[in-house]
Image (tube, rainbow, N blue to C red):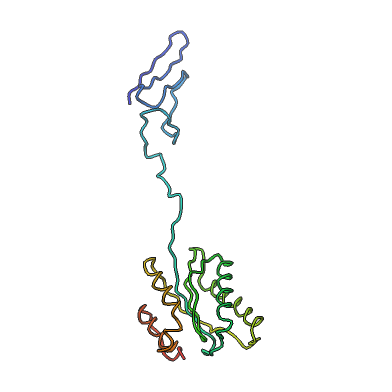
């Protein structure tokens, strides 16, 4: 950029003239103004961005967080009766929505449940499951003959699911009764842990 200083003999004042290809003309004054610190105020055609311009910021956050979650009844008692099992799943789906999650598939048999859920990055999985277990236990106590006899096990297993595997997991959960005609929950659970590369102590699975 080129510039020139013009002075006026009669007034003793001067003005700084910026080349037309630069940023702007500076009006007359006792000293030329410093425009080097101005940021993002260039509107003239031909103005090029400088290091003073902040980099563009991504406008949104994009997530694909799906979990296959499994937990059973305490001591694996076969308490979840087929007569009210679908209503339990429906209620659990409502609780998941109330916790700001997405119920994608819920299924199981008399001693455990499988859930495929979509969660946000702000969810704490342990807190989410604590609230889900608490709410569903209260529903079972109030809506079935079990009263205060029912409780879930303390722990759970949770596995992340890729978008390409969602349909296969949905199908697996939908066919739980078929799976458990040939193998127990314990056998299924161990297979899932080993497939996911999760170490375990067998004495805590009984």
* Nearest the eye: 3 or 187: 187
Choose between 64 and 201: the one closer to the eye: 64
Q: Position of residue 36 (x, y in %)?
A: 41, 32
Figure quadrant of residue 38: top left
- Quadrant of image for the N terminus: top left
Left or right? Give the position of 2 relative to 89. left
Where is residue 92 shown, x and y percent of the image?
56, 74
Residue at (45% x, 77% y) in the render = 174
Give the image location of residue 15, x and y in percent. Answer: 43, 18
Report x, y in % for residue 157: 46, 79
Q: Nearer the viewer, residue 25 or 48?
A: 48
Task: Give the left or right position of residue 2, taking residue 141 as reference.
Answer: left
In this picture, residue 189 sits left or right of residue 128: left
- Give the answer, above or below, for where 44 lies relative to 126: above
Of all residues, the one furthest to the left in this rendering is: 2
Q: Is residue 83 above or below residue 18?
A: below
């Amino acid at each position: 950029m080129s510039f020139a200083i013009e002075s006026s003999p009669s007034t003793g004042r001067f003005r700084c003239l910026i080349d037309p290809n630069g940023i702007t003309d500076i009006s007359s004054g006792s000293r030329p103004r410093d425009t080097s610190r101005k940021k993002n105020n260039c509107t003239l055609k031909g103005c090029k961005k400088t290091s003073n311009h902040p980099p563009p910021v991504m406008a949104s956050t994009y997530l694909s967080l799906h979990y296959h979650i499994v937990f059973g009844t305490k001591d694996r008692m076969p308490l979840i009766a087929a007569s009210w099992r679908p209503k339990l799943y429906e209620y659990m789906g409502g609780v998941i929505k109330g916790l700001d999650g997405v119920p994608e598939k819920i299924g199981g048999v008399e001693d455990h449940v499988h859930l495929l859920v979509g969660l946000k990055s702000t969810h704490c999985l342990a807190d989410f499951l604590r609230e889900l277990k608490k709410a569903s236990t209260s529903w079972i106590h109030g809506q079935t003959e079990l009263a205060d006899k029912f409780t879930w096990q303390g722990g759970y297993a949770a596995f992340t699911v890729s978008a390409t595997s969602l349909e296969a997991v949905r199908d697996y959960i939908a066919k739980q009764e078929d799976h458990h005609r040939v193998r127990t929950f314990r056998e299924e659970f161990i297979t899932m842990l080993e497939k996911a590369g999760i170490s375990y102590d067998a004495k805590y699975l009984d």
